[in-house]
Structures are given as C-alpha cells and as structure tokens.
Amino acid sequence: MRNIRNLYINSSAVKEINFVEAAMVIQNSSIIFAKNVDSIWARAMNIRLALSANIM
C-alpha cells in the first residue's frame, strides 16, 4: 500500500502507471483466488459427504 500511495504523491510516477497491465494482474489474481475457493469448497463437500456416510 505504501508503494501505491507513493505513486499518487509523486505526480511524475502517475504517468508511468500502465493500467492495462494493472487490470491484467487484477484479473489473473481474481482467477487464482476463485480457483482456490472452488478447491476449498470441493474439499469441504467431500469431508461433509464422508462424515455423513460414517454417521449412517
């Protein structure tokens, strides 16, 4: 966060921000996050099914 604040404080650095690259980084990060959430959800459902099978 400090780096981002420094970019806004330094007006010459603001001109060097590549918004296309920044958007691609955000998009790829969100894709990775979504895959991790899906993986955790699948594991949780498998554990739930295994536990419910053991109860019966």
Image (spheres, grey):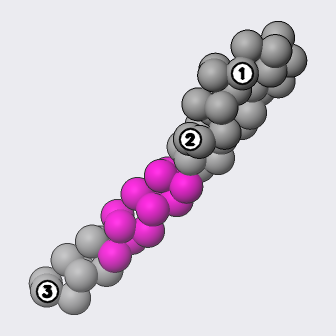
Q: Is residue 18 magenta?
A: no
Q: Nearer the viewer, residue 31 or 13?
A: 13
Quadrant in which the N terminus is drawn: top right
Mark seen at residue 10: 1
Which marked residue is nearer to the observer: mark 1 or mark 2?
1
* Residue positioned 47% across, 52% down in the render: 37
Q: CA distance from mark 3 to mark 1?
A: 62 Å
Asked which quadrant contains residue 28, the reply is top right
Going from N to C along the chain, the mark reached first, 3 or 2, is 2
- Secondary-structure class at tag 3: helix
Mark seen at residue 1: 2
Mark seen at residue 55: 3
Mark 3 in CB contact with mark 2 (< 8 angstroms): no
Q: Give the residues drawn in magenta, as a range.
A: 36-47
Where is residue 40 shown, x and y percent of the image? 45, 62
Where is residue 17 shown, x and y percent of the image? 80, 19
Q: CA distance from mark 1 to mark 2?
A: 14 Å
Asked which quadrant contains residue 31, the reply is top right
Mark 3 Cα within 10 Å, few/some/many (few <14, many 20+)? few
Q: Is residue 39 magenta?
A: yes
Mark seen at residue 42: none
In the figure, 11 relative to 42: above or below? Answer: above
